[in-house]
């Protein structure tokens, strides 16, 4: 029985580790993203250096929301990162992406400015240079 218990614990541990390492999002060439997801209807810029610094303040994900033209960025567990004085309600929906993919977008895009966009379907995208990060997940309901 103890062997079965040990195997069960090992399987749960492996599942937890692999789940936390899943990438959320996908990087597309900007032109392809525009065709797939439509034009951006709201665009807010953030200096790429600042966005890159925010990636070091969270372990797994950054969450993005534009409301009334104002950008809010959260880290893991919905910790407010930008702007620091923002108040976020638990029911406010954010779209999140993996830190690793945000860093890859920044590297591949090689631009001084990154654009956080809301598409005509309400989906949030990040664009840097000639690349767009999309296919994020929503929090709520899936919050980490």
Image: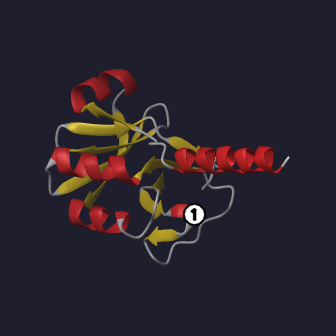
Q: Residue at x 50, y 37 (%)?
A: 122
| Residue 12 drawn above or below residue 60 | above
In the image, farthest residue toward the top:
35
Q: Nearer the viewer, residue 3 or 81?
A: 3
User: Callout 1: few (<14), some (14-19), or many (20+) C-alpha neighbours within 10 Å?
Assistant: some
Instruction: Judge left or right: residue 9 versus residue 1.
Output: left
Instruction: Judge left or right: residue 29 versus residue 93.
Output: left
- Hey, which quadrant is residue 62 in on the image? bottom left
Instruction: Judge left or right: residue 104 versus residue 125.
Output: left
Residue corresponding to mark 1: 78
Q: Residue at x 53, y 62 (%)?
A: 76
Q: Quadrant of the C terminus?
A: bottom right
Q: Nearer the viewer, residue 46 or 17?
A: 17
Q: Residue at x 26, y 47 (%)?
A: 104
Q: Nearer the viewer, residue 76 or 41?
A: 76
- For label 1, the SS is helix
């Amino acid at each position: 029985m103890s062997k079965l218990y040990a195997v069960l614990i090992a399987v749960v541990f492996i599942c937890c580790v692999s789940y936390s390492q899943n990438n959320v999002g996908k990087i597309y060439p900007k032109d392809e993203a525009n065709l797939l997801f439509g034009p951006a209807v709201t665009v807010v810029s953030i200096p790429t250096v600042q966005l890159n610094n925010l990636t070091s303040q969270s372990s797994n994900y950054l969450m993005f929301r534009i409301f009334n033209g104002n950008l809010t960025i959260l880290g893991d567990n919905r910790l407010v990162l930008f702007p620091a004085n923002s108040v976020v309600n638990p029911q406010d929906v954010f779209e999140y992406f993996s830190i690793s993919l945000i860093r890859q977008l920044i590297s591949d895009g090689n631009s001084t400015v990154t654009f956080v966009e809301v598409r005509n379907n309400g989906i949030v995208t990040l664009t840097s240079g000639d690349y767009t990060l999309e296919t994020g997940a929503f929090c709520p309901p899936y919050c980490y």
